[in-house]
Image (cartoon, rainbow, N blue to C red):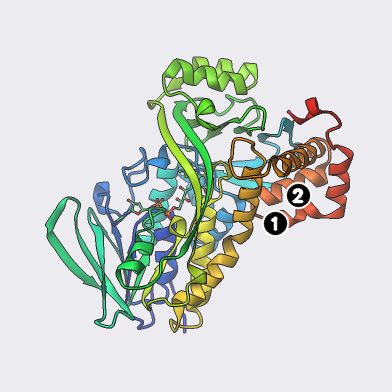
């Protein structure tokens, strides 16, 4: 009994979404179709009260917003499903639309992917994207944002079989605590895992946590550059290799703002944050002329740093007992190594899974949702962790397996440099428009084998 009119609700009561990041906003969007009222509670205070309108700098609760946030084609398609016309509207407001791979240089494992035109990519800064998304979600008459308030504890029935809301307070002011009742509480508070801790508080098991130590660090800076700063290209991506576990992404975002994000696996290769060293690190990875452009460019921010110790998956779908009325979504379920640029897409796919589950009502919703979300994110997790395992800096993988994975990625990318079909399969895997399993197609495997590294030197 899902209504199709935007913001209608169907008499299912009140949904309380905790966290106004991409995961929370996408969840609120689908809940607004089903619930009479949706409240999005956010710890950060938004300029203007939460309905959009800001969108420049990264905010405190989402410090990763200072770093490149690529939206995969699949992610953009899901947002477009939620808000028809969204991509064009963002472009009209200044976001950059580019044609992959004709206007995007991607160097994976040392090979430049063949420049075959494969589709449109939306490029914008995370604050810009989130701000526009929040404005869209809040345009529904039954959605409101309560900002500047944090969730501090769950509320539940005396027998604790149902979560009935959350205790909230202004940050650092416990005397302002108040209870907000809800028929469904959605934990979209990010990877810290407050929802999982709440389960324990309520007498349930915590979900099994799968951690993949990657020891990645980012450093990023925004610049003002003309659209032709990279010639015909609007983005350059140079991926890490086992021999040089450092990467670079330079993309045009909204208007004439560009972001340069550098990353490295392992402390010896973490990018520096002093401006001169930051630039030198970038120049070692970028083509000479791009380095020169950066040297002359006008920075508009300081260098921001972010440490990402491990990727994380919480297996809520394996729990045998769950209370009604509480689900976790977004990074709270799965946080992928950000170098694969898939976290926002996974959050959007989980929201789409929630929408499909809600179409069958709210009975046994948590269990049905976790199963469906696990399916939606599984391939992204598998692909990202396999790619991570090809890096010898990532502990816990047998060296022979790491070497085999590295050889096969290197060979596939070498084939993708000249073969449009292989480049398309790689693009489908990274943009999530197809399955990474497409890389196992006999045609792609044969091309990979033809490029298999022959000598140890070829491995680097
Ligand atoms: C360095 C870096 C780069 C990344 N690059 C990309 C990329 O290129 N592409 C991509 O798709 N993804 C990228 N990601 C991942 C992406 O940021 C997340 O996967 C995505 O935003 C989904 O996160 P979320 O909404 O679940 O959580 P978050 O974005 O962490 O949002 C959680 C929200 O909850 C709020 N909150 C926390 N606690 C409370 C509380 N107690 N009460 C109320 N509110 C609370 C926070 O303030 C915040 O607003 C990157 C991540 C990092 C770290």
Instruction: Find out if the beta carbon at label 2 lies less than 8 Å from the nearest ligand 1 atom.
Output: no
The part of the image, by quadrant, that contains residue 163 is: bottom left
Image coords of residue 316 (percent x, y): 48, 67
Whether residue 428 is situated above or below residue 305 in the rendered picture? below
Numbered disc 2: secondary structure: helix
Residue at (47% x, 38% y) in the render: 254
Q: How many numbered marks does the figure carry?
A: 2
| Rendered location of residue 143, percent (x, y) | 32, 66
With respect to residue 107, does 423 lie above or below?
Answer: below
Q: Is mark 1 within 8 Å of ligand 1?
A: no
Give percent across and percent down for residue 250. 55, 31
Residue nearer the viewer, 366 or 406: 406
> Mark 1 = which residue?
434
Write down the quadrant of residue 139 in the picture: bottom left
State the mark number for residue 425.
2
Evaluate if marks 1 and 2 touch, with contact meaning CB atoms under 8 Å apart: yes
Image coordinates for residue 405, horizontal then vertical, percent? 73, 43
- Vertically, is 195 above or below 342? below
Q: Badge 2, how many Cα within 10 Å: few under 14, some, many 20+?
A: many
Judge from the rendering whether residue 300 lies leftward or rightward of residue 346; answer left or right: left
State the CA–CA distance, disc 1 to disc 2.
Answer: 8 Å
Q: 189 or 203: nearer the eye?
A: 203
Which numbered disc, 1 or 2, marks the residue that appears first in the sequence?
A: 2
Q: Is residue 328 visible?
A: yes
Q: Is residue 140 visible?
A: no
Q: Is residue 236 left or right of residue 10?
A: right
> Where the C terminus falls, by quadrant?
top right
Q: Residues within 10 Å of mark 1 (few under 14, many from 20)?
A: some
Q: Quadrant of residue 81?
A: bottom right
Asked whether 186 or 204 is in front, the reply is 204
Q: Secondary structure at mark 1?
A: loop
The relative height of residue 327 versus residue 258 in the rendered view (above or below) is: below
């Amino acid at each position: 009994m899902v209504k199709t009119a935007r913001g209608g609700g169907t008499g299912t009561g009140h949904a309380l979404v905790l966290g106004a990041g991409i995961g929370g906003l996408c969840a609120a969007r689908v809940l607004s179709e089903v619930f009479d009222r949706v409240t999005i509670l956010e710890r950060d205070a938004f300029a203007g009260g939460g309905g959009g309108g800001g969108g420049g700098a990264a905010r405190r609760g989402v410090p990763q917003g200072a770093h490149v946030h690529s939206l995969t084609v699949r992610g953009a398609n899901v947002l477009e499903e939620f808000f028809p016309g969204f991509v064009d509207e963002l472009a009209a407001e200044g976001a950059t639309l580019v044609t992959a791979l004709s206007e995007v240089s991607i160097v994976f494992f040392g090979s430049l992917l063949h420049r075959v035109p494969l589709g449109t990519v939306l490029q914008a800064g995370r604050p810009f994207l989130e701000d526009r998304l929040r404005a869209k979600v809040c345009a529904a008459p039954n959605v409101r944002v309560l900002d500047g308030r944090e969730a501090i504890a769950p509320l539940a029935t005396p027998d604790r079989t149902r979560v009935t809301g959350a205790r909230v307070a202004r940050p650092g002011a416990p005397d302002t605590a108040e209870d907000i009742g809800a028929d469904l509480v959605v934990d979209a508070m990010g990877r810290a895992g407050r929802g999982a801790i709440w389960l324990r508080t309520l007498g349930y098991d915590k979900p099994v946590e799968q951690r993949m130590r990657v020891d990645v660090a980012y450093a990023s800076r925004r610049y003002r550059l003309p659209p032709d700063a990279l010639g015909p290209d609007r983005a350059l991506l140079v991926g890490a290799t086992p021999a040089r576990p450092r990467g670079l992404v330079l993309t045009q975002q909204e208007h004439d703002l560009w972001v340069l994000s550098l990353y490295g696996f392992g402390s010896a290769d973490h990018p520096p944050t002093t401006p001169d060293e930051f630039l030198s690190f970038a120049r070692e990875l970028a083509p000479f002329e791009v380095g020169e452009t950066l040297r002359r460019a006008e920075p508009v921010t300081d260098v921001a740093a972010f440490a990402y110790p491990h990727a994380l998956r919480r297996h809520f779908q394996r729990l045998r007992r769950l209370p009604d009325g509480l689900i976790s979504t977004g990074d709270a379920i799965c946080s992928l190594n950000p170098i694969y640029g898939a976290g926002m897409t996974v959050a959007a796919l989980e929201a789409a899974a929630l929408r499909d589950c809600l179409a069958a009502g709210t009975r046994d919703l948590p269990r049905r949702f976790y199963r469906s979300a696990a399916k939606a994110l599984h391939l992204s997790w598998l692909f990202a962790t396999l790619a991570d395992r090809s890096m010898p800096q990532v502990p816990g993988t047998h060296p022979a397996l790491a070497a085999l994975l590295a050889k096969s990625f290197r060979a596939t990318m070498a084939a993708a440099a000249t073969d449009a079909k292989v480049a398309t399969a790689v693009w489908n895997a990274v943009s999530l428009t197809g399955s990474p399993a497409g890389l196992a197609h006999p045609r792609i495997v044969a091309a990979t084998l033809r490029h298999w590294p022959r000598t140890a030197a070829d491995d680097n």
